Image: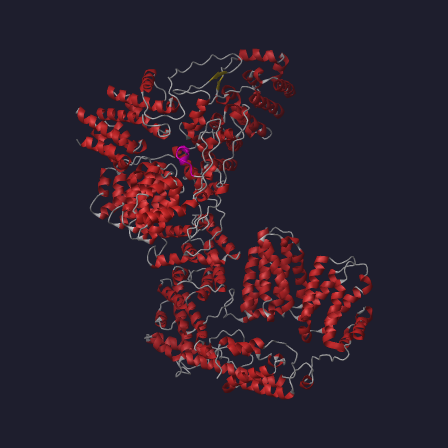
Amino acid sequence: MQEKNLAALANGLKKKFSPYAVSCVSTILDKFKEKKANVVAAMREAIDAIYPSTNLEAIQEDALAALENKNPSIKTETASFLARSFTKCTPTILTKKLLKGYVAVLLKTFNDSDANVRDASAEALGTAMKVVGEKGIMPFLGDMEPLKMAKIKECCEKAVLQVKIPGSKIVKLKEQPKPIEAAKSGPVIRKPTGGPGKPSGSQSSKQAGAGPPKTATKKVPQKSSASEEKIEKELSQEEVDEQFLALFPAQVVSELTDSNWKMRLAAMEQVLEKIRFLEKGELPVQVILRSITKKPGLKDTNFQVLKLKMEGVKVLAEKGDFSKKSVEFCLNEVTEKLGDVKNSATAAECLTAMTEAVGLDWISQELVSFVLNQKNPKVHAEAAIWLSNAIREFGFVVQPKLVIDFCKKSVQASNPAIRAAGISLAGTLYMYMGAPLRVFFEGEKPALLQTLDAEFDKHASSRPPAPVRGLKLAQGQQRGPENSKVESEPAESVNIEDLVPRTDVSSHFTGQIITELCDKNWKVRNEALQKVETVIKEAKFIAPNLGELPSALAQRLTDSNKILVQTGLSICQQLAVAMGPNIRQHIRTLVPGILQSLSDNKANVRQAAITTLDTLAEQCGIMKDFFEGEMIADALKGGNPYLKADLLAWVADKLGNALGINKEDLKGILPQLYACVEDRNADVRKGAQEAVLPFMILLGYEPMMRAAQNLKPASKNTIVGLLDKTRPNLPVKPQPPPPTSSGFATTARPKSANPKLVLPIIDDDNAATVRGHEKKPASARVPSKSRLPSANAKSIPGRTKKDEDIDISPLLQHNSLKSQRINDEMKLKCLKWNFVSPREEFVDQLKDQMTVAGFNKSLMQNMFHTDFKMHIRAIESLQEDLNNGNIEAQKSNLDLLLKWMTIRFFDTNPSVLIKGLDYLSCAFNALSQDDYKMHDLETSCFVPYLITKIGDPKDTVKNSVHQIIRQICRVAHTPRLMLHLMDGLKSKNARQRTECLDELGYFIENVGSVVYQGTPFLKEIAKQIADRDNSVRNAALNCVVQAYFVEGDKVRNMIGHLAEKDLAMLEERIKRAGKNRPPAQTTATKNTSPDSKLPQSRIGRPGSAPVLQNVNNNLPKELESKEEKARGCHEEFQNIAEDLENEIGKNIGAHPVDINDVLSKLKKADFDDVRTEAPRRETSIPRPSPTKSTLEPAAHRVAAIDLLISQVLDDNPYKCTQALQQIEQSLKQDPMMIAKVDSVIRACTQQLIMNGEENARTQLDSLKVYQSCLRTLLALYSSDLLGSKGSSESLEALMPTLIGILVDGRFEGESKELSSVFKQTNMLILRIVEKSDHTAITSTLLRLLLDSVDSKGPNSKYVDLVQKCIWKVIRLLPEWIPSLKLEVILQDIHDFMKAYPNASWKGRESDMPIRTVKTILHTIVKDVGRDILDLLNGIKDLNSSELYPYLKKIFSQGGLTSKEPRSSESSISNVSTDPSGTLSKKDQDRLTTIVRKIGTRDLTREGLSEFYDFKLEHPEADLAPFFWKMLRILSSLYRTRTTPC
């Protein structure tokens, strides 16, 4: 009754019964030992009903175990069940792999002593033969007795298949034909026998497309002589001599073996000529071959004779019917001659010709077996090289295991030539076999493995070349698309899994360990899981037979102990990797438990489950097994939102690469998918909406719409709207493939089946557009199940993965995912980045986050490679990306980059650490320039690990960490950074504690009380005074001393209770520090250094203050600081007012400054609002130069600047650009650079000249150097002060170089990088003209114009640019003339007119240069008047040019006699009479009074108000001469937001 119920359930549920099918089959097979006929019949009915819900692969393990059972009834019924199952199979289902496993055991039962067992086995074997054909099953049957073979064939004829085998007809079997007797002088052709029902002609072609794929594809019999095997009878020596004499004279026969090499040479020439003359059918190959190889034969000592003999062999192989028997006569000798220096190339050609005649497979076997016994290393090396080239030319038509063994022995050889050839051969094999090839070299030495990995990396992105030689081509076939496809097929037919040696571990998983896995005590279960994990790790590659382990392991995936769940998931991953594609038979057992793990509320457990699913999918190759049996549909029925959200996201991702999935299985998931679209959880809804498109691609719009009709009206409207919105995003339907004459199925090459190219791109607002599908070939679409043979299903994932390894996308993507990552970490949705040493789960999480963030895959491979050199390469890539200005992308992914660097801090290689710290320094420098602010989580995930390196014994590392911490302070929250430094004091490493205290002291000195305000930091620091380490004590004392200089006597309360000894040490240190401390400079001192970095809170405090005494202890710190600021500011105003009174008449016209901007700012500034913000300036951190600390002496800083400038001229582009970047920062921050302007200009000019010359730099490096030099010069000329310090000599070198760049046509191309250099140069020239010293730039341009004009005429483009610069100067001359040294300008004009007088311009195309020079003269004369004549006295040979006559002409024609010239030493009196509207004496006195009021503390506001009114009353007056010294104070007043009283 139970069996009948089971059969009824199976018949009713059909596919839905699949989750229970395997366990039921196992039980029924075991119950076949029952002797009651009615029970056995019921069980037969039940197992037959169950079979449609499962497959042969899933039940293989149980069926094979039943066939090996001792009970004959079980064996009989199992074999009969298999026979019935085979009748429902096609060749596609009954693959070679399955057939091999079943036939091997059925052959054992076929020899059983029980007759019923033998009959049932024969029936099963015969049915299998009927399905796959005789040719398909014969390789597994081996040598069998004729009677047994006849029995199997009889069963084959009787078998009735219940399914139709596509492309073939069932015909009667034919007996194997007898071989035809060989003729004397020619080979006998024996055609291979066909399988059952062998078709002919076109029928054979059809069967080729429908038969077992993979290796069967290349062995399909075709009606072509290329597939005919040549069987040749060996002739006796007498027959050979007789037939040879019939072709050649007796003299030639005797001369071939003559001792005189000349006679042998002449005879061989005659033979070779005759061979070339004879037609193919007239060539007795064996006769001629054996005659010319007769002693001395191919061992001839004369290289000329030997070469002719091998050429003869080559011609015979190319023209004649060259059989394997013929090859046997000469192969070893020809192979041996590969080591001959003079005839090595001829021997290789001869081998190639023989290979084309008989095939590479057989030749390679014979060659390898011969070479391995050779002692000559030259022969071995050359043979390996030839074999490598032959595989590329003929395709991968060799025995993989044989060639791999030969390759392994070659790479292990002591001879370097053999090793090199073996490594080259390994690289060729890698192109065809891919990454699994490395498995065979796992046991090699690390150095050899590293060399092999490098060779594999060279070929990682290479596709196997199409064969250019082969049997078909040798027989004269034309190469067409079909032939190319057939010839390239062997390269895809290598099943690497068949070559991997696997270990049967089923004996380890006995009843005891299974019992322990199910024990009530979790510790016992944990120990059992550890044992399983150990077995898998030791075995490395295991056989598919796992016993009862899968069922027991599945229970642990739903264990109440989450640690055991994670361990179980890890074991599932290891099993998948160790078993490879064989894991497919355990998918239905393991996956339900894995899916249940997705409902866990811990993110790390869910992440481990997703990783396990990915691993299983990758190893299985196809997704069909995951969707069978409603596993996914049942999981989605649950109410857990975590499970549904993660599972839907995973399904949406994997369906893009899904092939061969049953549409009925997908339709069974649709109700749950639609329900998830309306789920209350946002993540579930989002996942469901993203999964709709992949489902629609595989099912189509109509089936999904029909499924939506059964929903409730409210839900129906939502789903239909979503389907209609998704429908436009479907890819274009692929065109049907053109019909092929050979009948081979047109399948998509794996490289074009990239799912990323198939799916459309959906925008955020769900308005999707399909990109790129118009240009995709039909093979790029997802093919239907009927079109795609299952053989390629295995190869597609491997090939796709290889394709994805080639990633040319940007290293980092600019996105907004960082905020989501931060939120997830704050809500504990992912692992918090906190560990003592990085565990695997942290690394995996980081990998996943980088993948989601769109990191370049090649970059990620380098980042997580086991070789430290790859880490260095990754850091260099990031550094280059930063140098290219991709700062936004680096900001978007800063948290991930910092986390990866923390992992590198745990590496032992110093090169990676130093390189990483250099990159971090540049990154934080760029971030601070961009005003970036780090999130606290970014700081906390990186700084604690950085501080662990602050105590490194290497000074390079230690100094770099100090520098980075100070750079981080610019972009991070200072108190948070100080908190991490305080945590560093808890370390057991004394060096780390010392360096942390030094850093805290630095910040206290430069930042002030913000370091410790409101925290017990000083108390913790003071505790370090009692440390046993002397350096820690000193550092702690220095910290407290710095705090004392800021706080005074308050420090006693802040540090808490100290031991008497420690307190005495502290007081002594403060006293000594006070004596050695230089006196503080007041702001009233005129010579206050601009480089002073002392905080404002220390102004006015004596350096030698008594112990723990505060001068202003009655004032709060903020008010005290503000008071001192205001006092210093007003005192400086007073000093400037007094200076103005003394010098007011001496500087009119000098330093012309537009004061209107300052006045408007003072008018608009709301000083009352600023009053409360003033103390905030105290906490600002001074930004030192990134190359030197601000506390170093000036001499050291100057030396550091000189070193940087010298590095600009380095030939290394990287060093040069780094130095230029640091100089650019120093120009903005370091006043020491004022004295180094000329050096910087000269260095940049020289580097620009060197970069423009022909050198070894790449175009990319040259562009980087150009851009760095131009950026540095732009930074220099952005400052009026720095720009005016450039000398004429520097400008004379710089300007021609820059104009030369503009003239160079290379920088005017369409390239964005080249055009940016052109634009930057143009902008720089304009800034140089505006910001340089006026005399220097004007003189430089005039001399440049003089040099660029020659006697033949000017270079139009170059001269035009120089003239444009001079025209810019002419427009600015009216403003510049007061500060110009006119004597220098007139001297340059004189030199130009002397070299090119007016007469010389006649007959030229353009006289614009002389007209430009005359315009300068007109402009100067218009402003200066006749006083210009007095300036001509400094010109020695004035009469040698036309300058003086031209000036007289201007005065006589221009009417300039009435205008008084402007004097540079005008007094107040003659200013008052100037018609230009300047101030009178009375107004000047009033203005002096206003200035004094501004400088007086109590009258500043009144003075500023009067000054503004004065400006309104006298808008025509030029007030700049009066206030040029005061402008710095006014600007400082505005910037520091100090409120005047």
Q: Main secondary structure of the magenta part?
A: loop
* Quarter assignment of residue 822: bottom left
Q: Is residue 538 visible?
A: no
Q: How many marks?
A: 0
Q: Nearer the viewer, residue 421 or 277?
A: 277
Measuring from the top left, give residue 524's x and y in whole percent.
Answer: 23, 46
Q: Nearer the viewer, residue 195 or 1096?
A: 195
Q: Is residue 1397 magenta?
A: no
Measuring from the top left, give residue 941's x and y in whole percent.
Answer: 39, 59
* Quarter assignment of residue 1363: bottom right
The region drawn magenta spans: 782-793
Is 1230 left or right of 18, judged from the image as shown?
Answer: right
Vertically, is 314 above or below 664? above
Measuring from the top left, give residue 1529's x and y in whole percent.
Answer: 54, 79
Is 528 left or right of 968, judged from the image as shown?
Answer: left
Is 913 left or right of 123, judged from the image as shown?
Answer: right
Q: Quadrant of the N terminus?
A: top left
* Quarter assignment of residue 1034: bottom left
